[in-house]
């Protein structure tokens, strides 16, 4: 079993790696929105029982370098359809077992494991456990949350108070 500290360290390492790989420019344009240095996220995205709590995106980062979300797949989700993303997607499993099919090859992701999807890869997700799957999603560069709304039928709502 992976400790909470271990999960935090792995999550932070994945996020930092993605930001460094994509290139991070600390310089901000004068008209760029200010960033929020802490918080519980920005909004929820929902579709078919899948819930994504957007933790970091342009609204609180002040830029589009990266997006970070916490996704929950309910047990009832079963096996989702194949789809593609226009950005790098990194998935870090927190709990449950995620079936992660990339370009036709099934990978079983257990807590503490990372899955990677490069732009243009086909991917499908499945719940392989008798409990929901919770995972962190990292998209670089940002903009994938809006693509989920525009192209994949996700609805957005504010975070509960």
Image (cartoon, rainbow, N blue to C red):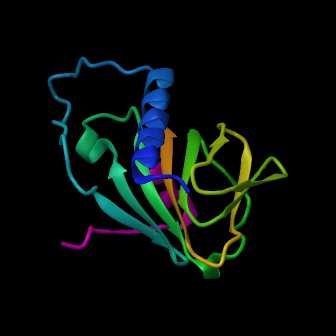
Residue 53 coordinates in the image, percent (x, y): 38, 61
Q: Residue at x 46, y 33 (%)?
A: 13
Taking 114 as reference, is 151 above or below it?
A: below
Tell me, yes or no, whether the highlighted magenta stretch contains residue 148.
yes
Q: Residue at x 65, y 64 (%)?
A: 97
User: Hey, which residue is sitting farthest bottom in the picture?
Assistant: 76
Residue 3 coordinates in the image, percent (x, y): 46, 52
Residue numbers of the magenta segment: 141-161
Q: Quick check: 117 left or right of 71?
A: right
Looking at this view, is 32 or 99 the one in front? Answer: 99
Residue 116 coordinates in the image, percent (x, y): 65, 41
Q: Using the rendered image of the protein, determine whether residue 54 is visible from the camera's viewpoint.
A: yes
Where residue 161 sits, quadrant-wise, is bottom left
Q: Quick check: 91 left or right of 125?
A: left
Looking at this view, is 43 or 9 the one in front? Answer: 9
Q: Residue at x 63, y 76 (%)?
A: 77
Q: Quick check: 83 left or right of 21?
A: right
- Locate the N terminus and report the quarter of the image it occupies: bottom right
């Amino acid at each position: 079993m992976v400790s909470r500290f271990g999960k935090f360290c792995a999550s932070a390492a994945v996020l930092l790696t993605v930001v460094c790989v994509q290139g991070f420019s600390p310089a901000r344009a004068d008209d760029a929105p200010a960033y929020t240095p802490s918080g519980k996220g920005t909004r929820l995205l929902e579709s078919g029982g899948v819930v994504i709590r957007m933790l970091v995106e342009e609204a609180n980062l002040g830029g589009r370098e990266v997006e970070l979300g916490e996704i929950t797949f309910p047990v009832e989700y079963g096996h989702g359809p194949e789809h593609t993303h226009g950005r790098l997607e990194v998935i870090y499993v927190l709990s449950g077992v995620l079936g992660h099919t990339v370009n036709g090859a099934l990978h079983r992701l257990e807590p503490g494991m990372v899955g990677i999807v490069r732009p243009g890869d086909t991917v499908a997700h499945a719940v392989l456990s008798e409990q929901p799957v919770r995972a962190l999603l990292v998209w670089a560069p940002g903009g994938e949350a809006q693509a989920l709304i525009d192209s994949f039928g996700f609805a957005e709502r504010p975070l509960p108070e």
